[in-house]
Image (cartoon, helix red, strand yellow):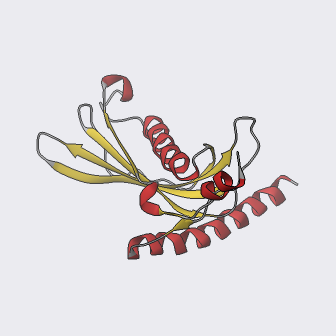
Amino acid sequence: MNDNDKENLLRPRPVRESISEMTEIVLPNDANPLNALLGGRLMHWIDLAGAMAAQRHSRTYAVTASIDHMDFLVPVRVGDFVVLRSSVNRVFHTSMEVGVKVWVENYRSLENQHVSSAYLTFVAIEASGNKVVVPPVIPETEEEKRRYDGAARRREMRRAESQRRKEDRS
């Protein structure tokens, strides 16, 4: 790879270039005995949607380093569509925060409801597993700027919590 290619890989990119959307239909295998989506299955889909945005932005592999708190706001039933939208909120160096918002779509009644939101941290790596520098992200809209600023605050909270857990193990 020549210097021009490397420079192009690290060129700042707008948030819109990382936006990813995926849709899943909830099948009986995805549900509990009450025909509601399993939380673990939703977490799996959130991880996949987040990875797509991270990899789209970094143009390399990205692995999950952490996921912040999640609430499950409404039940999702067998037969419903689950729509997951993700984008990179902020880049730090080799890591990036990705936001994922989840909606349930009942195609029979045409109702959409917010199910959950999550912030995940991904680390960019090359095929050998070494960390790689991620290009900066450019927030353009007011919403993107709000998420960008919030990502710095959430990063500090994650660092403080990580330090607290280390001290608890000592």
Q: Position of residue 157 (x, y in %)?
A: 65, 68
Query: Does residue 11 lie above or below 130 as drawn?
Result: below
Q: Is residue 44 left or right of residue 158?
A: left
Q: Residue furthest right?
A: 170
Query: Does residue 94 lie above or below 79 as drawn?
Result: below
| Residue occupying the point 54% across, 75% down | 149
Q: Depth check: give the residue in front, 151 or 114.
A: 151
Q: Depth check: give the residue in front, 136 or 63.
A: 136
| Residue occupying the point 19% across, 42% down | 106
- Quarter that holds the N terminus: top right
Query: Does residue 90 lie above or below 87 as drawn?
Result: below
Q: Position of residue 61 (x, y in %)?
A: 62, 41
| Residue occupying the point 34% across, 26% down | 33
Q: Position of residue 89 (x, y in %)?
A: 51, 63
Image quadrant assignment for residue 95: bottom right
| Residue occupying the point 44% across, 39% down | 45
Q: Position of residue 93 (x, y in %)?
A: 69, 61
Query: Does residue 3 lie above or below 60 as drawn?
Result: below
